[in-house]
Image (tube, grey):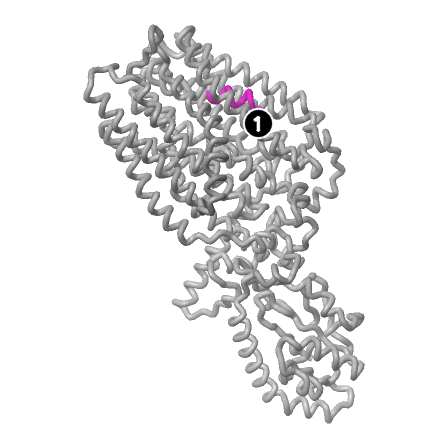
């Protein structure tokens, strides 16, 4: 399934590994535009995993890690990981390639039942990727999780091979017990699902920052080995089945899998093993759940007239979760959901693609498979897929993508994905006409070579959609949430196979009608995808840097961040009006206080209002200017608002999280500020000038991250 685009996805594949993220390009060493008070949630009910992925790099820097290899050589631990992965992939494809015919010919199930079981197995394998990722991140770490699921995998494969021996589960087809099938396929699905999301990131853990350039070479080797293993297993497994039996065709992959586990264990002392840092999945779900709860509260307040402070809302119900979670974490979830929306039609592409191992195999069973004096096994033609991927990936890159780019044609990732979906529809319509020819001719008269065009066209579609889709997802998702995006991708495969199982098992129609039906459903979702793609705007790099915890490095990048200046101006004007009204109400009490006590507190105004500006002792002149970089800069995806309802008279928290206490004295600056404050943008400078002239102490303006001035006017 899908290769890796060496010029596209490879450069993004390990962005979620802190060493590579911090050492790549010119972004290393940047500081987040979110203040530390946003990154480190100050709420008392904050969960320790809320900012997972933001602070993980700092934790890893504290670890004393000795990386193997150098800038030109792989770490020695890599060969153990690759040995394990090649053995696992060979075992999986060797079993899967003959599963459909095993269910029909050995177990005695009819075609539709066999195809349904095959798709349920595929769906389960991809569903269990979530469990593997969660256990590795939150409980055991990658090494122990891979080892655990490998053992479960080997147990399932062993049971499956033993029960394939004639007579173990019953005398013949149609009378054999399914217990071996359930335990065997269940163990294999759990095992391969648990391993699938971990191998690539565990490989990345072995590389130091100085070895990032080796990743491309690693995955070229990794990619070719996996596809070559798939190609040869798809050829050898049917031959063993035909010459000896199903039991030997399943036993050899089981033995290879056992050997791969031994190889993996042999590298134990050489592996770099990260400690589990907590699962981002739980944080992701908590933020969504909190947003839904706050949305319900907001709706109820409209019908019951109960007050609801809708302080945080911007453009999504998730914004309201910023009252309990950091703004950065919430904005990351919002961006991930935008990417996952693009994945909406993907289950139906995988519904078509994964029928190559079920319905296309069944179609080949009733075709003429003779080549000269040799009768070819049906499953062997399925080996065309990995072989065609190896052939066409470089062809697409050098003969299609690059020439089109040189001509200035915008063949964007979303357009490539749409083209891949269209090709999948064409492939199924070709399969429908092949089926029509089979139905209208004597049995075994239509040659199996007529299946080659549908395999070729579907492989083209896979290259355009699968590889490009992963590249798109990685380029538009925050670093700490890339695992969520990958989970969404894998779950789309699971959903597609469940759709297959439902349609094949429940809809009574001819094979020709089913091919047309599947192709037409995909065609409908192509139009849906086009609408989604039309309204999708790729995330600006400066915004993505902000979500990744990196700050813009110059004024131009700061200006590129979209700030709703009009709303900012309106809020300031409203605030000024409110403060002027308060000034009129409090004027008499202020004058009375001044007359009654020479040391009474006096108000400091902002733009003529009676609001006092507060500054703690020891806060030197010029510190406002020196700390401008610490102020939260709202972005188009994050006009963050920080809850100020809990701020008391005794203390505030500024943008870097330091507590500022009240001054011992409050000096009257009304007259000076009334003369100087003609412009909102010059407030800080005017106040500093007044400080110099009168040798008086100011109190700090608390700038809310929503760009609204929130001022404490207590004495």
Q: Residue 24: which quarter of the image?
A: top right
Residue 359 picture location, percent across and down: 32, 25
Q: Which residue is mark 1?
A: 222
Q: Residue at x 47, y 58 (%)?
A: 316
Instruction: Sort mark 1 into few (<14), some (14-19) or many (20+) by Cα contacts within 10 Å.
Output: some
350 sits to left or right of 702:
left
Magenta residues, start to end = 85-93
Q: Which is the main secondary structure of the residues drawn in magenta? A: helix
Pick the front one: 535 or 567? 535
**Count the marks: how many?**
1
Q: Is residue 711 above or below residue 443?
A: below
384 sits to left or right of 55:
left
Q: Residue 78: which quarter of the image?
A: top right
Q: Is residue 92 magenta?
A: yes
Q: Residue at x 19, y 21 (%)?
A: 440
Q: Is residue 523 above or below residue 309?
A: above
Secondary element type, mark 1: helix
Residue 211 picture location, percent across and down: 69, 35
Q: Is residue 320 above or below residue 106?
A: below
255 sits to left or right of 344:
right
Residue 631 picture location, percent across and down: 66, 64
Residue 400 picture location, percent across and down: 45, 37
Pick the front one: 456 or 176? 456
Q: Residue 452: which quarter of the image?
A: top left
Q: Residue at x 76, y 90 (%)?
A: 597
Q: Which quadrant is the C terminus positioned in?
A: bottom right
Pick the front one: 703 or 529? 529
Q: Is residue 547 above or below residue 355?
A: below
Q: Is residue 206 visible?
A: yes
């Amino acid at each position: 399934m899908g290769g890796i685009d060496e010029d596209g996805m490879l450069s993004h594949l390990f962005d979620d590994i802190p060493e590579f993220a911090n050492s790549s390009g010119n972004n290393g060493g940047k500081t987040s535009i979110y203040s530390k008070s946003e990154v480190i949630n100050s709420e008392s009910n904050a969960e320790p995993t809320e900012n997972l992925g933001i602070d993980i790099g700092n934790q890893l820097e504290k670890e004393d890690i000795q990386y193997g290899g150098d800038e030109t050589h792989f770490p020695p631990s890599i060969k153990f990981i690759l040995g394990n992965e090649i053995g696992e992939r060979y075992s999986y494809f060797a079993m899967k390639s003959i599963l459909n015919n095993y269910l029909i010919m050995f177990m005695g199930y009819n075609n539709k039942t066999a195809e349904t079981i095959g798709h349920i197995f595929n769906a389960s394998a991809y569903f269990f990727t979530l469990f593997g990722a969660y256990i590795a991140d939150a409980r055991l770490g990658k090494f122990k999780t891979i080892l655990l699921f490998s053992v479960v995998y080997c147990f399932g494969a062993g049971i499956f091979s033993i029960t394939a021996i004639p007579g173990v589960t019953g005398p013949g087809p149609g009378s054999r017990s399914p217990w071996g099938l359930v335990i065997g396929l269940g163990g294999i699905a759990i095992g391969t699902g648990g391993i699938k999301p971990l191998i690539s990131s565990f490989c990345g853990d072995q590389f130091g920052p100085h070895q990032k350039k080796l990743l491309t070479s690693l995955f070229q080797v990794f990619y070719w080995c996996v596809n070559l293993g798939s190609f040869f297993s798809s050829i050898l497994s049917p031959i063993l089945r035909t010459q000896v039996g199903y039991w030997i065709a399943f036993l050899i992959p089981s033995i290879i899998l056992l050997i791969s586990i031994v190889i993996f264990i042999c590298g134990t002392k050489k592996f770099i093993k990260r400690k589990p840092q907590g699962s981002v999945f739980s944080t992701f779900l908590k933020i969504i759940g909190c947003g839904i709860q706050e949305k319900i509260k907001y709706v109820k307040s409209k019908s019951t007239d109960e007050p609801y402070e809708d302080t945080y809302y911007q453009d999504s119900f998730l914004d309201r979760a910023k009252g309990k979670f950091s703004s950065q974490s919430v904005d990351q979830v919002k961006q991930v959901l935008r990417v996952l929306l693009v994945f909406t039609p993907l289950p139906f592409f995988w519904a078509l693609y994964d029928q190559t191992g079920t319905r296309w195999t069944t179609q080949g069973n009733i075709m003429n498979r003779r080549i000269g004096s040799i009768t070819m096994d049906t499953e062997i033609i399925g080996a065309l897929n990995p072989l065609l991927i190896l052939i066409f990936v470089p062809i697409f890159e050098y003969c299609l993508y690059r020439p089109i780019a040189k001509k200035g044609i915008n063949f964007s990732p979303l357009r490539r994905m749409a083209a891949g979906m269209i090709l999948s529809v064409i492939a199924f319509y070709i399969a429908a006409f092949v089926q029509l020819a089979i139905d209208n001719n004597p049995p075994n008269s239509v040659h199996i070579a007529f299946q080659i065009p549908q395999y070729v066209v579907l492989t083209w579609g896979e290259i355009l959609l699968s590889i490009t889709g992963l590249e798109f997802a990685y380029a538009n998702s925050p670093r700490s949430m890339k695992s969520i995006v990958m989970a969404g991708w894998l779950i789309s495969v699971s959903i597609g196979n469940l759709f297959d199982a439902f349609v094949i098992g429940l809809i009574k129609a001819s094979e020709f009608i089913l091919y047309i039906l599947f192709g037409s459903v995909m065609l409908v979702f192509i139009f849906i995808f086009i609408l989604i793609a039309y309204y999708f705007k790729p995330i600006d790099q400066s915004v993505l840097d902000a979500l990744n915890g990196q700050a813009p490095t110059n004024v131009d990048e700061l200006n590129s961040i979209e700030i709703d200046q009009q709303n900012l101006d309106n809020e300031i004007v409203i605030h000024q009006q409110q403060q002027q009204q308060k000034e009129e109400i409090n004027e008499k009490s202020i004058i009375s206080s001044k007359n009654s006590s020479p040391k009474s507190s006096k108000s400091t105004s902002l733009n003529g209002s009676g609001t006092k500006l507060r500054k703690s002792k020891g806060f030197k002149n010029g510190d406002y200017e020196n700390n401008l970089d610490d102020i939260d800069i709202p972005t188009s995806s994050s006009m963050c608002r920080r809850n100020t309802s809990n701020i008391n008279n005794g203390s505030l928290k500024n943008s870097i999280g330091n507590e500022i206490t009240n001054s011992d004295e409050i000096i009257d600056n009304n007259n000076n500020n009334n003369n100087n404050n003609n412009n909102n943008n010059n407030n800080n400078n005017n106040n500093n000038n007044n400080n110099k002239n009168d040798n008086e102490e100011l109190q700090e303006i608390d700038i809310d991250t929503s760009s609204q001035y929130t001022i404490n006017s207590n004495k």
